[in-house]
């Protein structure tokens, strides 16, 4: 088995031509889903993740505009959550972040945010373990408008082989266990 990460657009293109057998992630825009099948597992929103002890966590009257004073990690333009993030920022009067780093690398994001005062705008599921473990926290920002479905994307009309079926069943079981609080 080979596991890769990347922008949704690249992953779906690789899935479509058979370089990948499965994409686990957010539901893409309808025009990107031609020839593909999506099985929803749960929904989630993006969060503004920071290290525990970040100065903005202590602010009583935190305003979202204050993030402009910090390095902000944002999804790359091809990331499926990028339009949601852009819309949320624009809705709150934030046009362009002058100190932004675009990345879809979760390993970089975790390492950078845990060691600096940077703010990471990322899907909650990517950082849920770090939040539960107290290494990261979230800024008090209403991100409900960024909610979207997360699931399994496969090629339409193809029956998965044994290994892929086992992988998909394992993912479904883990999500079901998490939803039960196990």
Image: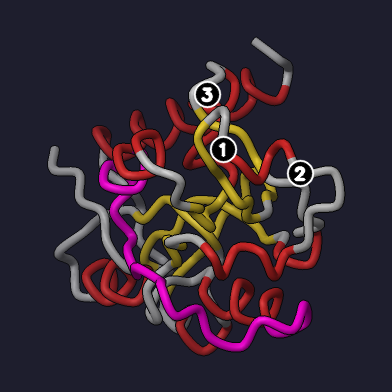
| Residue that badge 1 annotates | 54
Q: Is residue 61 left or right of residue 58?
A: right
Classed neighbour count for the residue bearing mark 2: other residues with Cα under 10 Å, few (<14), some (14–19), many (≥20)? few
Instruction: Describe the colour scheme in one phrase.
Output: secondary structure
Q: Of all residues shown, which one is farthest toward the right?
A: 61
| Residue that badge 3 annotates | 174
Tag 2 near tag 3, CB within 8 Å = no
Q: Is mark 3 on a helix, strand or loop?
A: helix
Specify which label sits upstream in the sequence, 3 or 1.
1
| Rendered view: 14 above or below 152 | below
Q: Nearer the viewer, residue 157 or 29?
A: 29
Quick one: quadrant of the C terminus?
top right
Q: What element carries label 1?
A: loop
Q: Residue at x 13, y 43 (%)?
A: 2
Specify which label sits upstream in the sequence, 1 or 2.
1
Give the image quarter of residue 92.
bottom right
Q: Which of 167 and 114 is in front in this view?
A: 114
Question: Residue 48, image x and y in percent?
Answer: 61, 52
| Rendered view: 38 above or below 92 | above
Q: How far apart are marks 1 and 2 (CA)?
A: 10 Å
Q: What element carries label 2?
A: loop
Question: Residue 114, image x and y in percent?
Answer: 39, 34
Q: Residue at x 34, y 68 (%)?
A: 101
Q: Residue at x 73, y 17 (%)?
A: 180
**Magenta range:** 90-110
Q: How far apart are marks 3 and 1 (CA)?
A: 31 Å
* Disc on res. 157: none
Q: How far apart are marks 2 and 3 (CA)?
A: 36 Å
* Disc on res. 59: 2
Residue 105 within the magenta-colored segment of the rendering = yes
Residue 54 within the magenta-colored segment of the rendering = no
Q: Of all residues shown, which one is farthest toward the top?
A: 182
């Amino acid at each position: 088995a080979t596991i890769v990460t990347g922008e949704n657009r690249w992953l779906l293109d690789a899935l479509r031509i058979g370089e990948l057998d499965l994409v686990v992630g957010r539901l893409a825009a309808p025009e990107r889903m031609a020839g593909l099948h999506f099985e929803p597992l749960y929904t989630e929103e993006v969060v503004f993740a920071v290290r525990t002890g970040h100065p903005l966590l202590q602010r009583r009257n935190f305003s979202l505009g204050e993030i402009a004073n910090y390095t902000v990690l944002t999804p790359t333009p091809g990331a499926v959550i990028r339009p949601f993030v852009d819309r949320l920022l624009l809705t709150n009067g934030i046009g362009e972040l002058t100190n932004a780093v675009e990345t879809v690398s979760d390993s970089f994001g975790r390492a950078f945010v845990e060691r600096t005062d940077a703010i990471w705008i990322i899907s909650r599921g990517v950082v849920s373990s770090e939040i539960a473990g107290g290494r990261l926290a979230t800024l008090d920002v209403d991100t409900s408008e960024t909610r979207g479905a997360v699931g399994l994307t496969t090629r339409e009309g193809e029956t998965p082989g044994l290994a892929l079926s086992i992988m998909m069943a394992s993912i479904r079981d883990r999500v079901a266990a998490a939803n039960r609080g196990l």
